[in-house]
Amino acid sequence: MTDHHPRTKAVHAGTRRSQYGELSEAIFLTQGFAYSTAEDAEARFIKAGEDEFIYARYGNPTVRMFEERISAIEGAEDGFATASGMAAVNGALVSILKAGDHVVASRALFGSCLYILEEILPRYGVEVTLVDGTDLAAWRAAIRPDTSVVFFETISNPTLEVINVKAVCDLAHAVDAIVVADNVFATPVYSKAIEQGVDVVIYSATKHIDGQGRVLGGVILGTKDFIRKTVEPYLKHTGGAMSPFTAWTLLKGLETLDLRVRAQTQTAMKLAKALEGHEKLAKVIYPALESHPQHKVCMDQMGAGGTILAIDVSGGRDASFKMLNALEIFSISNNLGDAKSIATPPAFTTHQRLPQDQKDVLGITDGLIRLSIGLEDADDLLADLSGALNAI
Ligand SMILES: *Cc1c(COP(=O)(O)O)cnc(C)c1O
């Protein structure tokens, strides 16, 4: 499998077949495993590992297939699947950190990631410094000889700031800090995060990997040593395991991930170009547009802009709500990466908790709408957006 391209790995990597030779992956919907003898039980507990399952909180054959397949696509040595994306973010950070440690993170983050960094970690004596992730001088100033973890979203939610992954990794590695990246917006299709220096890659599989809004899931990817010695002991004892049914759904999601994400990205690009300069919009934010401040970094890093764009509707809450309410194809929801196109007003939903001054710094205006582009016809989506803007 190692010589094949990601699209081939997405269909075949990690497959395990039972004695029946089933073509589609089996759902091993079992929490436990039986041993033929007491000696066998004893041996299994000594040597539980990749192929030796003892309890589904520790591992399960369907979950293991998902872990091996996503690791192969990403180019990671190993992975640990979790019950949600946030279980992965929390599991990766908490399994590394201890009281007295210092973390540097970009300030533009998914609301729950920000909550872990700002509210939870400091309670356990971890010092967190937040920086403008697009400013290399700010990273340089914040990273100290005793910094143990550097954390960022490679493309931030919801304002689509793009981190210069290689440059930030170089700064982190100069002090031996571990780089943990939430890579949801980049997707495994456009990610070269490990090659660019990231040590630990995290996905919320709820998003593009499922891509059809069915399940919650997450995964932590890294070296075999890191996953087995740091992540696994923490997660197997604290219970953030993925269910076998979820793993099966995500295995099926991985098979079509590349096709879906490329099609959704192509439509996102078309819509971003068509909407840029629209009289009702103060701004169109999409990393593949030349007007985006990190356009070059994004194209060098990923070669595409991804499936998400953001528009800033002039006229604040009133105007953006009028537009949202006039949409016919787009759903008002807070998922993303889905086959169905979704519109989200972050200031009033996912980032509602933030104080106004923090929203101002992050550019989360009352008119901002995050658009997750789905698999519908691009012309229909454009007509929907244009019609809704005209309704303002
Ligand atoms: C959705 C999301 C998460 C959390 O994932 P869940 O599966 O909802 O727990 C974390 N980071 C980013 C960037 C996300 O978009």
Image: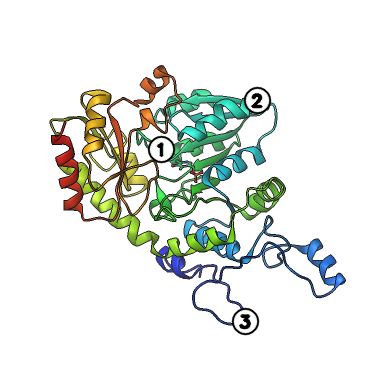
Dot 1 alpha-carbon crowd within 10 angstroms: few under 14, some 14 to 19, many 20 or more: many
Name the amino acid, label 1. Asn
- Between 205 and 301, the residue placed more toward the observer is 205
Would residue 119 be found to the left or right of residue 286 on screen? right
Quarter of the figure with residue 286 = top left
Residue 178 quadrant: top right
Disc 3 and disc 2: Cα gap in Å? 50 Å
- Element type at mark 2: helix
Point out residue 8 in the picture as x, y percentages from the top left corner. Answer: 42, 69
Q: Position of residue 46 (x, y in %)?
A: 81, 62
- Which color scheme did the rendering employ for the protein? rainbow
Residue 162 position within the rendered picture, expressed as x and y whole percent measured from the top left:
37, 37
Helix, strand or loop at disc 1? loop
Vertical arrangement, residue 21 with respect to residue 163, above or below: below
Q: Is residue 205 above or below residue 25?
A: above
Vertical side of 316 occupied by 74: above or below: below
Separation of residues labelled 2 and 1 (CA atoms): 30 Å
Q: Answer yes or no: do the residues labelled 3 and 2 have beta carbons within 8 Å? A: no
Nearer to the camera, 360 or 150: 360
Residue type for callout 3: Gln
Please say if the residues under marks 3 and 1 sit with CB atoms less than 8 Å apart: no
Which residue corresponds to mark 2? 123
Q: Which residue position holds label 1? A: 164
Within 10 Å of the Cα at label 2, are there few (<14), some (14-19), or many (20+) other Cα atoms?
A: few
Q: Nearer the viewer, mark 2 or mark 1?
A: 2
Amino acid identity at mark 2: Arg
From the image, tell me which residue sits under label 3.
Answer: 19
- Rendered location of residue 136, percent (x, y): 43, 29
**Which mark is first along the chain, 1 or 3?**
3
